[in-house]
Amino acid sequence: MRLIDTLFQIVTRRADARPVAIVRMLVGLAAIGFALEAWVNIARSEFKRRPDTWIVAVRPGLVRTDSAKKSLEYDKELYPRVNALRQAFDSVGVDPDLGGLRIWKALPPQPDRALISFDGSIDEKPTI
């Protein structure tokens, strides 16, 4: 929640920040805060009921979805990394089925592991 408070302070201090933009940001940040709180409550109750429950974050890397393909059309001025994304899309990106298989293959995680990452950089080819 400190991150949300910090973002709020940064945006509200800007002289050119419009009230509508600030309200939209606050609504979004509030939704994120409520979602995180709900997730933590659910995780806590699962751990109490079933101590063998594991929770792990997964970074699937570049997955060739329709929305990712649409992002290839972004303007370089607004999204400077779009050229690297365009180059990596076919060579580094994986289709959703392969991405899913890689995740299932990595589960369950090791007892001391909280992150499974296929992310790396879009400048390097991930290992399977």
Image (cartoon, rainbow, N blue to C red):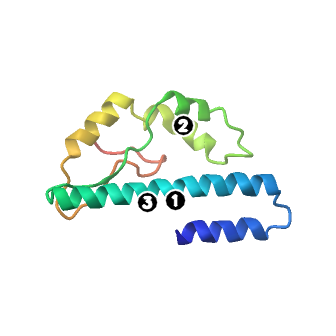
Circles 1 and 3, Cβ within 8 Å, touching? The answer is yes
Mark 1: secondary structure? helix
Which of the marked residues, 2 or 1, is nearer the chain's N terminus? 1
> Which residue is denoted by mark 2 in the rendering?
87
- Is residue 114 at all visible to an observer of this figure? no
Which of the marked residues, 2 or 3, is nearer the chain's N terminus? 3
Real-space CA distance between mark 2 and mark 3, rounded to the nearest whole angstrom:
38 Å
- In percent of width and height, residue 127 lies at 30, 45
- In percent of width and height, residue 91 lies at 44, 34
- Is 101 rendered above or below residue 11? above
Instruction: Locate the C terminus by quadrant.
Output: top left
- Determine the residue positioned at 73% across, 65% down: 11
- In percent of width and height, residue 118 lies at 35, 47
Mark 2: secondary structure? helix
Circles 2 and 3, Cβ within 8 Å, touching? The answer is no
Q: Nearer the viewer, mark 2 or mark 3?
A: 3
In screen coordinates, is 108 left or right of 102?
left
> Which residue is denoted by mark 1 in the rendering?
33
| Amino acid on which disc 3 is placed | Glu
Q: Quadrant of residue 17?
A: bottom right
| Amino acid on which disc 1 is placed | Gly
Mark 3: secondary structure? helix
Real-space CA distance between mark 1 and mark 3, rounded to the nearest whole angstrom:
6 Å
